[in-house]
Structures are given as C-alpha cells and as structure tokens.
Image (spheres, grey):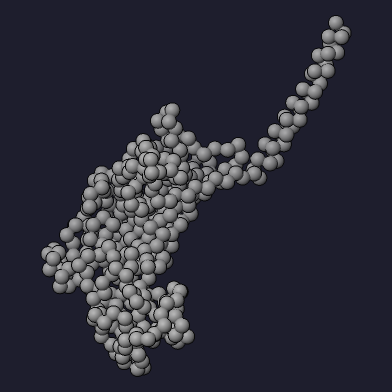
Amino acid sequence: MKKYQIVLLCLYIPLAIVSFFFVSWWVFYEVNLKDAVTAVKTNFVNNATYAEDDVYFMEINIYDNVVEWKWNYYVDTSLPEKNEDGTYDTKYMFSTGVQFYSQDVNENFEAYADNGVILTDIYVKMGAKNCTYYSNDGSETAYVSGGTNIANQNKWIWDVGGELCLIEAKGDVKFAGALWINGYEVFDTTKLMFENWESALTCENGLSIRTFDFSRYYTLKTFNSETGKFDVPVTDEKILKEWTFVNVKVTKSSNKMISASQSLFNSYKGDSDWQADGTEDKQTYWMDETVYHLNNNDLTYTKTNDGYYLSLKSACEKYLSEFKNVYFVLDINLDEFEEILNIKGLAENAFGDVEINEINISSSEKRDFIIYDEDLNIKTTNVTIISPQNLITGGEVC
C-alpha cells in the first residue's frame, strides 16, 4: 500500500507544480498584464470585388452649392462562383445617400439629446437637416427615400478581401454615468458625416480615392455559414484594438452644380430634370447655355529640355470625360505660374479624351505660347500663339 501511495505522490507532485504555475500565471495576467496588452486587428475596406465596375462603399460628391454622401452595398449573403478565368460573377447592389445644399457644416447638422426607454438614459445624437435622402435599386436615377433614411441605416453588407462582412455603426457608446443617470453618445452615419465634413472638403479638385480611418464609427462582423447570420465578431483573449480603413471615392469641383445629371443620384431635391437656370428643356440648356470653367488648378506640368508644358490632370480628365454635351472653357493665367517653371505652351494631346471648346490665355507681359493643336479655339491677351516646329519634346510628368 505504501508503494502505491509513493507512486501516486510521484505522479501528483509534478502535475501540482505545473498546475500551480499556470494558475499563478493566469492570476498575474488578469491582475497586471491584461490591461496592458493590445491585439491589433486592421480591416481595409476597398472597392467591391463582386461589382462590374470600380464601385466603392462610400462616395462623396462636392460642389460649391451641393454636397452628397452615398453608400453602396450588397443585399444578399451568397458569394458568386469563381469563373475559370479567375473572375467572379457580379452581385446585385443597392445604394442610399443624402444630398445637402450648403458647404457650411452648421447649416446641415444639429446636436440634440433624447431619452431612451429608461428615462434616466440620455442619448446625445447628431441630426441632419435641410437635405434630401435617396435610395437607388440600380436604375439610372435614384428615388427620394420614404419612411427610412440614411440616418436610420447603420448596417451594410460589403466584402473585405473577398469575404462578405457586415459593416456596422458602433451605435450607443457610454461616456458618462452619475448616480442613476447614464449618458450615451450615438456613433452613426450622421455623426460620421458631421465629424468628417471638413476633411472631405479639403480634398483636391477632381476625382480622388482617399483613405479614411473610420475605426471610431464602424465595426465588422463576418458571415457565419452555420447560422446564416453575420454574428462572428472579432474577438481575442487580449484587449482588442480594431482599425477600419475605408477607401472613399471623392469627386470635387470648385464650381456650382448646374444640372441634376451631375449628382450622384441624378437628381436635385428629388427633381431629375433640374437645371440651374430653371428650364427643364435639357437639349436647349445643354446646347446653348451650359458652361464648365477650368483654370490653372486643373493643369499639371510636363518637363522637357526647354521648359514646361501644360496638360490636364489625369484625375480631372477622368472626371470630365463623364460629362456629355457640356461647353468646356479653359482659362489660363500665365502670371500665376512660378517664373522658374518657364511655361512654354500646351503639351501634345494635352486634354486626352476631353474636348475643350474654348481656351483663354492671358499674361500681363507679352510672351509666346506654343500650341500643338491648331484646331483649338483660342483667345489671348498679350500672348502670341506659335507652332512647335523643330522643338525637342518628351520628358516626365511632374
């Protein structure tokens, strides 16, 4: 019997030592280390994998008199089959958004407080005003939303790295509590627009893809094929810091919106035929009166052996090529360019696929300006147009 007890002790003591070590480590981790350890999870929300064209989860359209925010998303949870050539079939997409009529953030948003079901819970929210909400089921023109709007929509299906996820606004976040009163701040789409309004407006003119850190507003959940729901939150035994970076398509113009066709929703205050001059005769308006002005800010430089040549920025060209039946006027003020640039003229094929209908070139002093395309309609002030014969061309774009 004693030999049996000795054998048990020999087996028990090592197990007890190992168990004591792990229990001690667990207690030490919970008491001292847990709050100091952070696990980082980073999500990059890029353009849609299962869309025919480059479609982005969020789009912003900025004019002097109109600012629009638009969300695109899938409406079902089935993944398309991968084709033999490595491509995927497209998925049906829906979109919702909002149209504002001023660049002044204070004219578009207001803060207010609400009581919840429990009257001692106070919710601080941002509300949008002086705006129109839209929905689009894939048609050319969006329709004005009815009983719901973007302010109440805080969940979207998107793909992150080809995997369908639920992008969800954080919602109610507790920020204060005293006695029986609790304060919550609501992180939703309206708050996102309000707090990122000025950042969006500082983007450059033309079309750009900008990356915003929306960790403050969004969390992501992956799809659970067993339950058929997006109920798999990102978890970790350590403290989790989740970053969500979203690529946003920003289109900006320093001019005013003059036609509903320039809108992300092809509508202005719900009117798809709206024109700035009050007429709804599109053909007459576009043919006779629509003028879109460009200036020095829309140009870039091509360096050559004898100086610099001007051409349209690629982002601007891509943006303007979407317009139809618009009369483009380019105003070039040579005095605004640094003297060191030694601007010689316009580069070959300076405007790409954009047809510039009229060019006005001015200078306070008399100077020559080289033009390759002799068919351009050009008006000058103190500028003499010359041909580019025997010039050395080529170089890199600055």
Residue occupying image coordinates x 45% and y 76%: 395
Q: Quadrant of residue 370?
A: bottom left
- Check the image and report above or below for 234 versus 62: above
Residue farthest right in this picture: 2
Q: Nearer the viewer, residue 361 or 345?
A: 345
Residue occupying image coordinates x 46% and y 83%: 305
Q: Quadrant of residue 225?
A: top left
Residue occupying image coordinates x 43% and y 35%: 223
Q: Quadrant of residue 171?
A: top left
- Check the image and report above or below for 58 versus 157: below
Q: Find residue 79 and report its horizontal and vertical position in percent.
A: 38, 37
Locate the N terminus by quadrant: top right
Q: Find residue 365 and report its horizontal and vertical position in percent.
A: 36, 93
Q: Is residue 185 left or right of residue 37?
A: left
Q: Nearer the viewer, residue 318 or 133?
A: 318
Q: Is residue 191 left or right of residue 294?
A: right
Q: Find residue 2 and report its horizontal and vertical position in percent.
A: 87, 8
Residue farthest bottom in this picture: 366
Q: Find residue 266 and report its horizontal and vertical position in percent.
A: 23, 57
Residue 126 seen by the camera: no
Q: Is residue 336 left or right of residue 35?
A: left
Q: Nearer the viewer, residue 398 or 327?
A: 398
Count of number-bearing discs: 0
- Check the image and report above or below for 26 versus 159: above
Residue occupying image coordinates x 70% and y 41%: 32
Residue 207 seen by the camera: yes
Residue farthest top in this picture: 1
Q: Nearer the viewer, residue 160 or 235?
A: 160
